[in-house]
Image: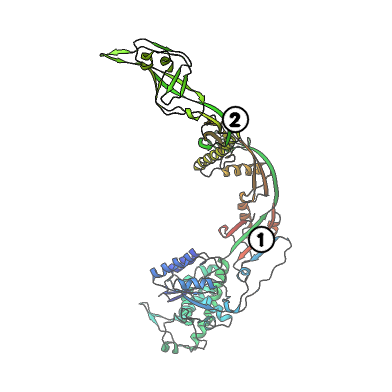
Amino acid sequence: MASSTKIINVLKDDSFEEILGIFKITPAEEVIFVLPKSARAFKKEEHFASLQDESKSLNKAVSFLCSDAELNDLAKKYKFDVLLAHSPAPRKSKKQPSDLGSINVVNQIEDFYSEPIHEEDSILTTPAMNILEDSSGEDNFTPALAAISQNGRRLDDVFVPEDEHRHSVKVSGKTEKAVPVDVYKEGFGEYNLDNELSRDMKSVWGSSSVPLVAKVRSSKNLLSKILSPIGKLFSSQGSNLSKESRASLRPAHRTGLIVLSLVAVIILGAVIFISTGKAQVTIKPVSQPLDFRLAIFSSDSISSTSLERLSIPGQLFNIKKTVSQDFPATGHVDVAQKARGTITVYNELPVDQPLVTTTRFESSDKHIFRTLTSIVVPAAKTVGGKIVPSSRDVLLIADKAGKDYNIPAGKFTIPAFKEQGSTEKYEKVYGQSSSPMNGGTSGQSTVATEDDLNKAKEILAIQLASNIKDDLESQMDRLNILNANQVMIESPVSKGLKDSSAVTFTVSLSGSLKTIGFKDSDLITLVAQYVDSQKGMKTIPEKITINYDNPHWDEAKNGLSFNIHVTGPGYAKIDRQKISSDLLGKNDTEMRAYLGQISGVSSAQVSLSPFWVRSIPKDGNKVEIIIDY
């Protein structure tokens, strides 16, 4: 039958997954977790959430005994009971003198008491261990209870009620009278507890030729039979004996149970002493400062990092952009300019009409313009009894400068025909404009200066570089690009610079960027290969600094060339696997001698746990090698 309460003592290095596994398989209806001041388990809030889900699923009550205020607050947050703990002053470990200087061997019991312990937050300092279960699933509370008894303390000294969320667990310190135990019958005769325990004890101690460890391993059922009645006798919550049954126990039985409890503690201690133990070896390798420069090349034609060529693979980017904008003209000049424009000359006469250069045309508002070229207007045609005039276009320029000649579109006549008295020609040879004459001016005019053009180019160059950079960032995908600002600018294209009548001018600017993007990891790999081959050392990416210099597009090689300056520490290479294998089973003196003779080791520290372990475990899975760079 499974006991109703189980106490799980949590070691400092126990993981939450290990503790949760023990919780799931225990048949007890109530579980009390006893935690040290500092422990890996229950450090995260999700641990309490997971435990709450499991406790609800398994219908188990959970309590915590710990002096850590934050852990107690989390326990109460997830509706767990909290028990207050008090303890005697912690033991101080004695440091062993080291004859190898920097090679230290320490035990993790020192870490347990590393923080000052105050009376209000002290915790039970008995050795932490998991409760042993027998094959029937019963819990053994003897180690924890025996430790309390050995220190002269009862559970009522350890558990102190504090508020409504905490419960006290008390066991009377009075001497109980021995009473006879009921006899159980299961079809094979009577079962006598004294006889059965006596026979089991003889099976353990009867032969001196069998090692104690072997006897313990082969006597799991015996331990269950020994520990179960002892746990029931001392447990404040697990006892199912009535007052009448306890009153009937004989004194001889009580004496036998006390002796057997001491034997059980010795056996269980031997099992734990032999089967437990962990080692953590922290090694600090010898370091040496690094300071060197390399010329690196990157191209999309390179497939992998090459130490021989100092080259790394990259991705090609070739981006082209054009920007255009209107700018105000700020210059002023004195000008005298004639208006000009184009008209169409019509001929309704049946003969061709030639017109020489500078032929005068007069507008309807009496402004005189002259032709800039000579033309011949073909004779008119008769179509369906109607005369269809022929036409030719000709460019006109005002006879004088000034804004007055900037006239709207209209009809033009040739005053020379009127002066010659040729009325027919005057009426049937004429001109017509479809757009106004413009450009006529006199006096001061606004024009774009050279300074206006230079400022326009500077503004557009910044905008062009920004547009190219934005386009580049949308494509680079975490690649390192060193020359993103090296945009090649083409000659600007401008309009309206020579138009004296315009108050603005337009400038267009085009540019391009051709570069290579590379992965930082490829460059770090190349640096590590170089340090390994040239100096025989190891680099740590987080501890080295790489500065870049003179990145530029190499047109001849069709790639990016740049220089790097590498600084930071380099470390001696440490064979972690060999050290772990060589240390197995070594004691204090042997491990000091071994670690002291390894080349490249600046200092080392060995941490053994639990506190009684004095040598490296022989199981490699229980040895952790840490390289402290």
Of residues 404 and 197, the one drawn nearer to the viewer in this rendering: 404
Q: Position of residue 50 (x, y in %)?
A: 44, 65
> Relative to 588, is 222 on the left or the right?
left
- How far across and down, in percent of the image, does residue 72 sit? 51, 73
Residue 454 % position (x, y): 59, 35
Instruction: State which quadrant residue 487 falls in.
Output: top right
Mark 1 vs mark 2, CA separation in Å:
56 Å
What's the colour scheme? rainbow
Depth check: give the residue in front, 474 or 436.
Answer: 436
Q: Tell me whether the residue at label 1 lies in contact with that at label 2, contact meaning CB atoms closer than 8 angstroms.
A: no
**Location of the C terminus (image quadrant):** bottom right
Tell which residue pokes out farthest to the top in this image: 351
Local crowd size for mark 1, using a 10 Å CA cut-off: few (<14), some (14–19), many (≥20): some
In this figure, which residue is indicated by the disc labeled 1? 605
Neighbourhood count class around disc 2 (C-alpha, 10 Å): few under 14, some 14–19, many 20 upward? few
Q: Which mark is residue 555?
A: 2
Q: Amino acid at mark 2?
A: Glu
Q: Locate the N terminus by quadrant.
A: bottom left
Report the residue at 57% width, 67% height from top.
274
In the displayed image of the protein, which residue is found farthest to the left? 384
The mark that comes first in sequence, 1 or 2, is: 2
Q: Specify whether residue 433 is in view.
A: no
Figure label count:
2
SS state under label 2: loop
